[in-house]
Amino acid sequence: MVASDPTAPPQDGPEGGEARRAAKRDSLFLLAVLTDEAGASRGNARVRNLSETGLMADCELSFRAGDRLVVHLRGIGEVAGAVAWANESRIGMMFDHRINPQAARKPVTGSTSHQVPDHLRPVPGSFRFRR
């Protein structure tokens, strides 16, 4: 193991490439919409993994490293960033600002949508059996 020079300036700060790449990624399958920064559609994407600092996705259209995009993520909203790498229909995107990737896993609607409708609920005391 080679010791690093403690007097050398850091190569990457807390927001640098290495620190950003090291962010914990969460594997998932999430459909998202891509636009350019002016709001013009750039197609749909299937997000394969998501972290605080970026994502990897399969895209309908091809992109190049450096392309600026806005991804519309369920539970998070619009997130701007740049394509860090592109390989055929797959891209890696680095966000301009950190996000909470767990928010994409939360249900979009409130908890009331998962409740049983009133007409399907049993009436209290209606199912008592007497011996």
Image (spheres, rainbow, N blue to C red):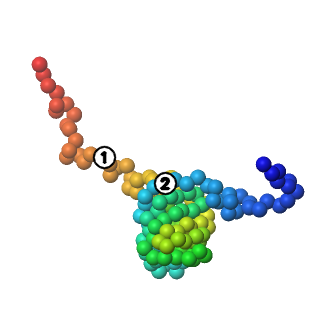
Residue 58 visible? The answer is: yes
Residue picked out by circle 2: 27
Residue located at (43% from left, 65% from top): 46
Residue located at (45% from left, 55% from top): 28
Question: Among all residues in the image, which is located at the extreme front?
Answer: 1
Question: Among all residues in the image, which is located at the extreme right?
Answer: 7
Q: Crowding near pointer 1: few (<14 within 10 Å), some, many (20+)?
A: few
Image quadrant holding the C terminus, namely top left
Q: Which kind of residue does numbered mark 1 sit on? A: Gln
Q: Secondary structure under badge 1? A: loop
Is residue 66 or residue 87 the one in the foreground?
A: 87
**First in residue order: circle 2 vs circle 1:** 2
In the image, residue 29 lies at what x, y percent?
43, 58
Residue picked out by circle 1: 115
Q: Which kind of residue does numbered mark 2 sit on? A: Ser
**Vertical arrangement, residue 117 with respect to residue 51, above or below:** above
| CB under 8 Å between discs 2 and 1 | no
**Vertical arrangement, residue 7 with respect to residue 95, above or below:** above
Say left or right for 131 vs 112: left
Of circles 2 and 1, which is in front?
2
Residue located at (20% from left, 37% from top): 123
